[in-house]
Image: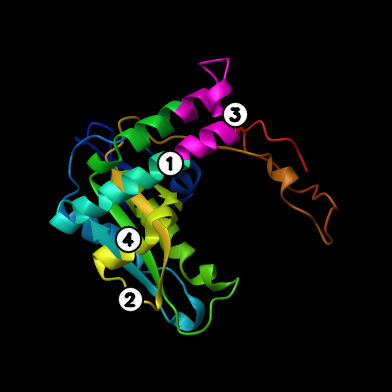
């Protein structure tokens, strides 16, 4: 599998493990459309994901530049701006002192994201066709497909972000887009050519996340590879 460099000119091999560790949430995009063949590959790859009993309950409602897509993007843009305004205040993004900090960079990316939402080349609403009553585990059959989608986009030189702020206008979206009652809108994924680039992601040390034999017992065999970048989250 190959990807494109940020300028889109040269193919660049990305191994599976490299892709897993360097696929960032991308929220700033160029205006370039995603060609049909690339979009087909991205969605096809998403549909290869595992699901309970191989029922494949995932469905992908792709919004580009059709009349209903434009209306849906307008609804989503309003919802995303409301969601970000609330999060910016509740999580302290509006009180950042150091403009060069990771949190400040996140805030700038998020502001661009919501300000330009209607211009995003592709928005995918991921639906889950329910065959039984809602339960806490149904995401196990939908979110692997979402991750496959994001990884496939990465492999082709694109970027994306998975969000849930579509819930703020879900009733309007369902009516506009004729979404059946037995389909849950489980995710909203935006896609486009990154203005920036992918690269190593920041995460907590793996030693904070892994227990050996019983909960709370450290695993002395886990180690982060050299060059791993960490977040500032405290161990808990």
Quadrant for the C terminus, please: top right
The alpha-carbon separation of the residues under discs 4 and 3 comes to 30 Å
Label 3 or label 1, whichever lies nearer to me, is 1
Q: Dot 3: few (<14), some (14–19), or many (≥20) neighbours within 10 Å?
A: few
* Residue corresponding to mark 2: 180
* Residue corresponding to mark 4: 172
The alpha-carbon separation of the residues under discs 1 and 4 comes to 16 Å
- Mark 4 element type: helix
The alpha-carbon separation of the residues under discs 2 and 4 comes to 13 Å
Query: Which numbered dot is residue 92?
Result: 3
Report how many numbered discs are placed on residues in the image: 4
Of mark 3 and mark 2, the one earlier in the sequence is: 3
- Asked whether residue 145 is in view, the answer is yes
Query: Which residues fall within the magenta stretch?
Result: 84-107
Of mark 2 and mark 1, the one earlier in the sequence is: 1
Percent x, y of residue 113: 36, 36
Of mark 2 and mark 4, the one earlier in the sequence is: 4
- Mark 3 element type: loop
């Amino acid at each position: 599998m190959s990807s494109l460099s940020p300028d889109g000119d040269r193919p660049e091999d990305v191994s599976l493990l490299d892709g897993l560790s360097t696929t960032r949430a991308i929220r700033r995009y160029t205006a370039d459309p995603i060609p049909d063949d690339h979009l087909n590959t991205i969605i096809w790859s998403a549909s290869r994901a595992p699901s309970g009993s191989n029922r494949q309950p995932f469905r992908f409602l792709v919004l580009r530049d059709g009349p209903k897509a434009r209306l849906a993007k307008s609804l989503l843009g309003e919802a995303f701006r409301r969601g970000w305004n609330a999060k910016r205040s509740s999580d302290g993004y509006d009180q950042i002192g150091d403009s060069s900090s990771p949190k400040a960079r996140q805030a700038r990316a998020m502001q661009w994201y919501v300000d330009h939402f209607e211009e995003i080349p592709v928005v995918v609403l991921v639906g889950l066709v329910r065959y039984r009553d809602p339960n806490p585990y149904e995401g196990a059959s939908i979110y692997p497909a979402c991750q496959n989608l994001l990884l496939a986009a990465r492999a082709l030189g694109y970027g994306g972000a998975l969000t849930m702020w579509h819930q703020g206008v879900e009733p309007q979206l369902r009516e506009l887009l004729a979404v059946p009652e037995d389909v849950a809108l489980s995710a909203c994924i935006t896609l486009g050519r990154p203005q920036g680039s992918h690269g190593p992601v920041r995460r907590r040390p793996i030693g904070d996340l892994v227990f050996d034999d019983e909960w709370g017992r450290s695993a002395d065999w886990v180690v982060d590879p050299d060059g791993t970048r960490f977040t500032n989250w405290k161990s808990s």
